[in-house]
Image (cartoon, grey):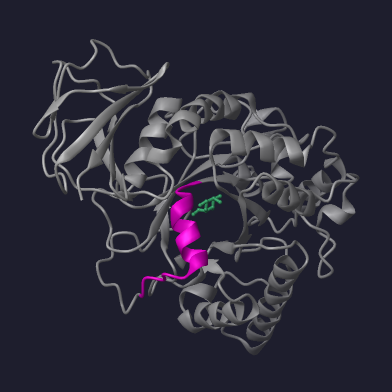
Amino acid sequence: KGDTANSETPDLKGWVRRTDPAMEKWRDNRFGCFIHFGTYSILGGQWNGKEVPGAAEWIKVGGRIPSAEYDKLVKQFTLENFDAKKWAADIRRMGAKYVIITTKHHDGFCLWDSKLTDYDIGSSPTKHAVLKELADAVRAEGMDMYFYYSIIDWHHPDYRAADPKTPEDQAAYARYLEFMKGQLKELLTDFGDIKGLWFDGRWDASYKNHPDIGKGLEAWLRELKPGIVLGDRVRAYDSFADYNSGYERKLPKTQPLLDWEACMTIPENSWGYHKTWSGVGRKTPKTLLEMLVRSAAMSGNFVLNIGPKGDGSFNEKDVERMEPIGVWMKSNGASIYGTEGLALTLPAGTYATRKDDKVFIHAFQWPETDKLPVKGLPGKIKSCTLMTKDGAKSIRFEGETLLDLPLTAPDVLDSVFTLEIEK
Ligand code: FHN
């Protein structure tokens, strides 16, 4: 199951590149943090003492857990270790500029006290107003808040996955769409400035077969919140909204023609908290950072997912990755934020980003000689520095080749050269 994405579709179908301040800000952010959090986080991928294969946030389906059992988790949602300010501070220290949280995932549980359902945090023992506290804390840390919302809803009695054919099913699904709009209105009015919505679960026939539903919803949202940033998952695969959000757990091979964002898990395929991460493909800080840099080098955004535990604390395995990325971002953020990609001829494992008259060369693989040849710069090099532990050090160059490089990489993750280019 999952989004099959518009990703490599070459036909842009009248897609217009937005250049308003809200969209420019989205672009400049470049690095976001996704949070999958809900009552499934309590289970951490295990049911009745056994590991359930598949993504931890899908455990209700993967573990064939009866609703009556699954719904009891709400009463265990105590969040004794939840601290929104700490979440926001840790995420900001990682270097993210925006946060996307699952306000409601496919299981239908709402992380805010919605007036339209009782299947929400308001029915749990916690005193924390998670969304409100988080949205405020995220903004206080200078980041942008985005809300994820699942179109699919395994809990709502009126939700229909199949294309509704009978008058009864059609009426039910129409009621569900109204419920969804009502919830979206709550999300856009009760939590301060929410920069955008991140829809998910457009693949059921009820939504996919009727592109007008998504288009109508999109128009309604744009009226409700002018400037809102919407990824293309609000639409039914037929065209793009503000950007292509279909790069899930993968990056494009070459730079796409339109704005895009990739979202990435740390384990192979689990977004919610998983106790063991038994699947293959746990990514290292270096692998994740290289994905972020490759994204910026293809003019796209990168969103790293974390899955906090059911008690509200962060998973140590997530933190082990967030911290080194944050240390790197603190010294090298200028080579990511507000940059765009630049197609240069470079050695393997080396990428380029650009901002104004600066070109940043990212060396994940350190050259085996003392030279780094660059080809295709937009002008002559005026100066070149290399970021080291002791600050930026001047580097000699001849034409487009960087010379006399140190024997080993100054940064174990990614060593960055800053080239000032003559205008
Ligand atoms: O099924 C979900 C999955 O659990 C997760 O939320 C991801 C995030 O992009 N989206 C869906 C699969 O496309």
**Viewer-proximal residue among 418 and 67:** 418
Look at the picture and state if 74 lies above or below 419: below
Residue 292 at least partly seen: no
Give the image quarter of residue 184. bottom right
Residue at point 46%, 80% (across, down): 211
Q: Nearer the viewer, residue 23 or 274?
A: 23
Q: Residue at x 35, y 26 (%)?
A: 414
Hey, which residue is sitting farthest top in the picture?
407
Q: Which sits in the foreground, 297 or 13?
A: 297
User: Is residue 60 on the magenta stretch?
Assistant: no
Tell me if residue 113 comes above or below residue 211 in the rendering: above
Identity of the residue drawn at 25% across and 23% down? 365
Residue numbers of the magenta segment: 16-31
Locate residue 315, reporting x and y percent. Answer: 65, 29
Q: Is residue 246 above or below residue 317?
A: below
Quadrant of the rendered image containing residue 24: bottom left
Q: Is residue 389 rendered to the left or right of residue 130?
A: left
Horizontal placement of 153 versus 267: left or right? right
**In the image: residue 24, left or right of residue 174:** left
Note whether residue 147 is visible: yes
Where residue 275 appears, as percent x and y from the top left, is: 64, 28
Residue furthest bottom as drawn: 167
In the image, is residue 17 part of the stretch drawn in magenta? yes
